[in-house]
Image (cartoon, helix red, strand yellow):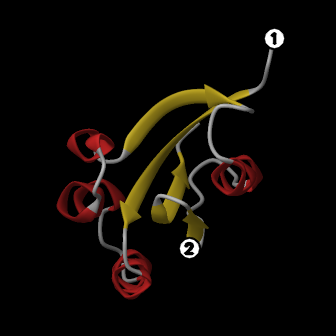
Amino acid sequence: MPETIRCAHILVEKQSLALEIEKKLKSGESFAKLAEQYSIDGSRRRGGDLGEFSRGVMVKPFEEAAFSLKVGEVSGLVKTQFGYHIIKRLV
């Protein structure tokens, strides 16, 4: 059975906004609330929750960052062709 993880993310188009969100997270603001407020994809309605996924499902830079996180840990900025992600590993 393949390894699966569950993550949430915040996806924005501009690096400057991603950096601003990163600062808010570091100051203790809620990941889910920031995802709802800023993220540009459909997961925003679920606080950024992408559900469970295994390797080979997400684009490479996202997958590498997500699978390197410990449960509860938040990534730095991850750039993909979709924009800038901040990823939080949930499970």
Res. 42 image quadrant: top left
Rendered position, 56 above or below 21:
above
Q: Residues within 10 Å of mark 2 (few under 14, many from 20)?
A: some
User: Is there a contact, CB below 8 Å, between mark 2 and mark 1?
Assistant: no
Query: Which label was assigned to residue 69?
Result: none
Residue with the most extreme right position: 1
Residue situated in front as seen by the camera: 40 or 67: 40
Which amino acid is tagged 2? Leu
Label 2, label 1: how many angstroms apart (C-alpha)?
A: 30 Å
Residue at 81% of width from left, 11% of height from top?
A: 1
In the shown orientation, is residue 87 left or right of residue 3? left
Rendered position, 50 above or below 74:
above
In the shown orientation, is residue 46 left or right of residue 20? left
Residue 69 is situated, as x and y percent measured from the top left of the image, at 69, 55
Q: Secondary structure at mark 2?
A: loop
Residue with the most extreme top position: 1
Residue 87 is situated, as x and y percent measured from the top left of the image, at 52, 57
Residue with the most extreme front position: 81
Q: Residues within 10 Å of mark 1 (few under 14, many from 20)?
A: few
The first of marks 2 and 1 along the sequence is 1
Q: Which residue is mark 1?
A: 1
Q: Which residue is mark 2?
A: 77
Residue at 37% of width from left, 83% of height from top?
A: 27
In the shown orientation, is residue 40 left or right of residue 9? left
